[in-house]
Image (cartoon, rainbow, N blue to C red):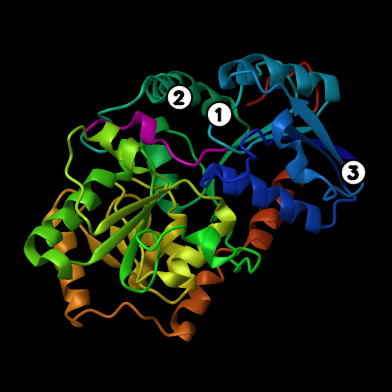
Amino acid sequence: MKKILIDARWLTNSMRGIGVFTKNLIYALIENDHDKFEFHLAVRKKFVSLLANKLPKNFYVVQLPDWCPDPILDLVVFNYLTKKLSADVVHFTGNTGFVLPRLAAHVLLTLHDVSFLKSADVVPFPNQNLRQAIGRIYRKVFVPFYAKSATKVCTVSEFAVKDIQHELGIAAEFIYHGFELAIDTSVSDNDIAATEHNRIDSTKYLAITGPDPQKNLTFVISAFISLYQKYKSEAPKLAVIGVNRQQYQRLKPGGLITENISFLGMCPHRDIPKYIQSCKTMIVPSFYESFGLPVIESLFFHKAPLCSSGGALPEIGASFAHYFDPRNQGTLVKLIESIEMGNLLIDLPAEQVGHHLSRFSWSIVANFYLSQYAAKNVAQDRETPCS
């Protein structure tokens, strides 16, 4: 029986992106036939409870210390765990990994993006806090080593395959991020909207974003400020999830915030569906995305999202989204005005998007990785370097 060590440090309660990928991949693996494998899930201690009562036989939890920073986990802890468990396969699910020159384990790295290697012209990165700046430097220095030492690199879109080849000169294989979105009826309307100002309904556009500069939050805020200055009380409204008012003001000190813009801050991932279902449609303004989960979340509710033309967003949104230039505020404003005037439709017939959405399945993702775990180990002898 093969021993599979999975880096599940990204498993959290509400994190999107890599966190959602890691969490749902593990849950999908649990649902599959696992008689051929013995899984060891390396999880930070404070998030072990997320796996409580979910693990069948052949699944085991390895607790990672909460205090331990990522570089120590990468360079020391996972090296030690791999040797201790005599793991046949080590799967790093979130961009970082380790260099094991003389360890005969099949090292599988899911490299979601290489945005940290981009110039400021491609992915702007002003106003970074200290943690973001250090993290960017760490990834820029070490991730190329991790990727080149891995037995195989996987990623989440065709765009990302080409980008990894361009930046690192290595081949990668893509499997789309899975997607399953269901309404959590246990969440009341009062949980979703504490005040009338923050309530999300069909009059509001929705942006799910973060403070990272590549998310381009100030761009979409500026577009709605421009609309307010033009239309006053009749201006289209925007609700922002993932950043609160104080965080935005740190990103843009002294920046104007007009009354058609509301900030809801962070919210659990389980709450997101009700927000998306209630809003007019999604806006995804990022300069760079290797996937774009909000795009397919919007399509799930048959709403055409407004997307930046950057990164993988045109690949994920296909012909169902409306696109704008993330450096030209006027292109977004024009799209919104066209929607408000009824000249641009955002409602999509279910039959048009169903086939497209079927490509984003956690079952497909789990089967893909199971096939990677089952592949013959390239290093049979534990004294032979991994290629």
User: Circles 2 and 1: CB distance less than 8 Å?
Assistant: yes
Label 2 secondary element:
helix
Residue 96 - label:
1
Q: Is residue 100 left or right of residue 308?
A: right
Count every numbered label the image shows and give the total: 3
* Residue at x-position 12% and y-position 56%: 226
Label 1 secondary element:
loop
Q: Earlier in the sequence, mark 3 or mark 1?
A: 3
Q: Which residues are magenta?
A: 110-120
Amino acid tagged 3: Asn
Q: Position of residue 301 (x, y in %)?
A: 47, 74
What is the CA distance from the residue labelled 2 to the residue labelled 1?
Answer: 8 Å
Q: Residues within 10 Å of mark 3 (few under 14, many from 20)?
A: some
In front: 346, or 230?
A: 230
Circle 3 sits on which residue? Answer: 58
In front: 317, or 132?
A: 132
